[in-house]
Image: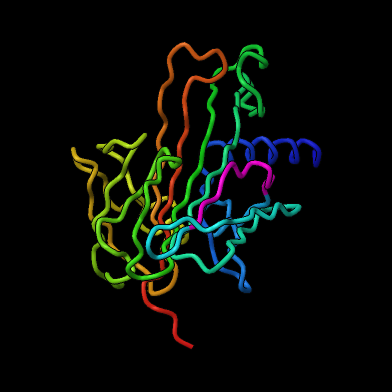
């Protein structure tokens, strides 16, 4: 019975990792840590799945950044304190079997697969007021603030625009407080990809969105799954 429970738990874990888990960064003990989880969950993940990290100064100039790949997560180490940080994770191809198990392979290697997807997760963090945002073409799904989010303040609305492959994306549902209420939808984008999202926290705000994009004529996956987050502090930190 315990063995069956373990198998069921593993299957559930795989499914949730495919569809529900998000990506963001947090500063912990002086380090910028990559968080992979759902809401308050902070799960272990394969650091090799981090496909890129980019840091910028306040003027939008790139800062070299090293990805420290630890046993159960990744840590980002920019050469100097960044104003802006972006990170991407490629979670690979996943296929679901008829008995609802998820396997980390394309459907061409999973006979009888009933679902298949390749998931990519992105996060944009803004640390310093007045930061100039560079082009972020490497982020295929992007929540772009239209004003400096560090100047808005808790209880007020932040205007944002969601871009999919560099173009405005309509009808994208946004979670305004992914870290505390990951299943609560705040609003969705209009025809121009714009929305107003309430800044909820004095501390870390994690605004998130996710999409499933159908693919044609792909032998391995039926959809491209995308998750993205925008993080910033609601108020300046005071000692």
Colour pattern: rainbow
User: Is 77 placed above or below 138 here?
Assistant: below
- Return the residue nearer the eye: 68 or 228: 68
Choose top left, top right, bottom left or bottom right for residue 106.
Answer: top right
Q: Residue at x 38, y 45 (%)?
A: 142
Q: For residue 47: magenta?
A: yes
- Return the residue nearer the eye: 133 or 171: 133
User: Is 184 placed above or below 198 here?
Assistant: above
Please give left or right for residue 171 compared with residue 57 in the image.
Answer: left
Q: Residue at x 20, y 42 (%)?
A: 190
- Return the residue nearer the eye: 37 or 142: 142
Q: Which residues are magenta?
A: 45-55
Q: Position of residue 129 (x, y in %)?
A: 35, 70
Image quadrant in which the N terminus is located:
top right
Q: Position of residue 220 (x, y in %)?
A: 57, 17
Q: Residue at x 50, y 42 (%)?
A: 121
User: Is 216 placed above or below 31 here?
Assistant: above
Q: Residue at x 24, y 68 (%)?
A: 156
Q: Is residue 121 visible?
A: yes
Q: Is residue 16 visible?
A: no
Q: For residue 141: magenta?
A: no
Q: Position of residue 127 (x, y in %)?
A: 43, 67
Q: Position of residue 126 (x, y in %)?
A: 41, 62
Please give left or right for residue 152 compared with residue 222 in the image.
Answer: left
Q: Residue furthest left?
A: 191
């Amino acid at each position: 019975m315990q063995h069956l429970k373990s198998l069921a738990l593993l299957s559930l874990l795989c499914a949730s990792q495919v569809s529900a888990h998000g990506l963001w960064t947090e500063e912990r003990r002086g380090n910028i840590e990559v968080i992979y989880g759902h809401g308050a969950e902070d799960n272990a993940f394969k650091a090799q799945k981090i496909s890129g990290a980019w840091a910028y100064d306040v003027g939008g100039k790139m800062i070299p950044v090293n990805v420290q790949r630890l046993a159960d997560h990744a840590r980002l180490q920019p050469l100097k304190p960044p104003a802006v940080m972006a990170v991407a994770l490629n979670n690979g191809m996943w296929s679901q079997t008829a008995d609802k198990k998820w396997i980390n392979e394309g459907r061409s290697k999973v006979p009888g697969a009933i679902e298949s997807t390749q998931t990519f997760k992105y996060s944009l963090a803004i640390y310093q007021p007045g930061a100039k945002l560079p082009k972020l073409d490497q982020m295929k799904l992007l929540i772009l603030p239209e004003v400096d989010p560090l100047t808005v303040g808790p209880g007020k609305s932040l205007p944002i625009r969601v871009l999919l492959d560099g173009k405005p994306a309509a009808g994208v549902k946004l979670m305004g407080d992914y870290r505390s209420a990951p299943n609560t939808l705040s609003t969705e984008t209009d025809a121009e990809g714009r929305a107003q999202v309430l800044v909820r926290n004095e501390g870390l705000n994690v605004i998130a969105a996710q999409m499933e994009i159908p693919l044609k004529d792909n032998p391995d996956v039926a959809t491209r799954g995308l998750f993205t987050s925008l993080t910033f502090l609601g108020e300046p930190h005071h000692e």
